[in-house]
Amino acid sequence: MEQLKVALANNRGQIQLLVDDQQVGEMEISVHNGQLTVYHTEVNPAYEGKGYAKLLLSKLVEYARENNLKIVPLCPYVHGQFKRYPELYQDIWYTQKND
């Protein structure tokens, strides 16, 4: 069974993906001044190709929207998805135009 959770301490942490209570993926994040910065997305190689990175991205987006945060996509995977589908993320994508 898949489970996603946000674990933050002192505004830094992870979005974790657990499968059968074992962590198989994560996104490294921080939250500061209304911005959620995502640094890295990683899925255990044994679990690649199952759409787990996309599940992590969905949780990231959900969390940002629920908490009225703008995402700074420093992670190449997230940035690539934002560029590929800007219409899906325009409300939460932090750009210089947001200043």
Image (spheres, grey):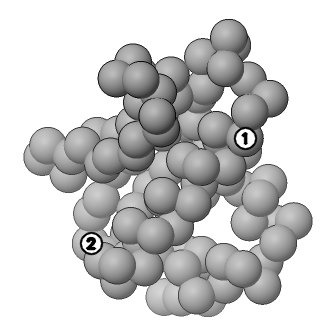
Image position of 55 with respect to 81: above or below: above
Residue placed furthest toward the left: 10
> Residue flagged by tag 2: what amino acid is it?
Asn
Q: Residue at x 64, y 38 (%)?
A: 52
Mark number for residue 33?
2
Residue placed furthest toward the front: 1
Residue placed furthest toward the top: 46
Q: Is residue 1 left or right of residue 56?
A: left
Front-most of residues 46 and 72: 46
> Residue flagged by tag 1: what amino acid is it?
Gly
x, y percent for residue 95:
61, 77
For label 2, count other residues whose C-alpha is less than 10 Å away and answer few (under 14), some (14-19) or many (20+): few
Residue annotated with mark 1: 51
Q: Is residue 4 left or right of residue 39?
A: left
Q: Using the rendered view, name the quadrant where residue 9 is placed.
A: top left
Q: How many marks?
A: 2
For label 1, count other residues whose C-alpha is less than 10 Å away and answer few (under 14), some (14-19) or many (20+): few
Image position of 34 with respect to 75: above or below: below
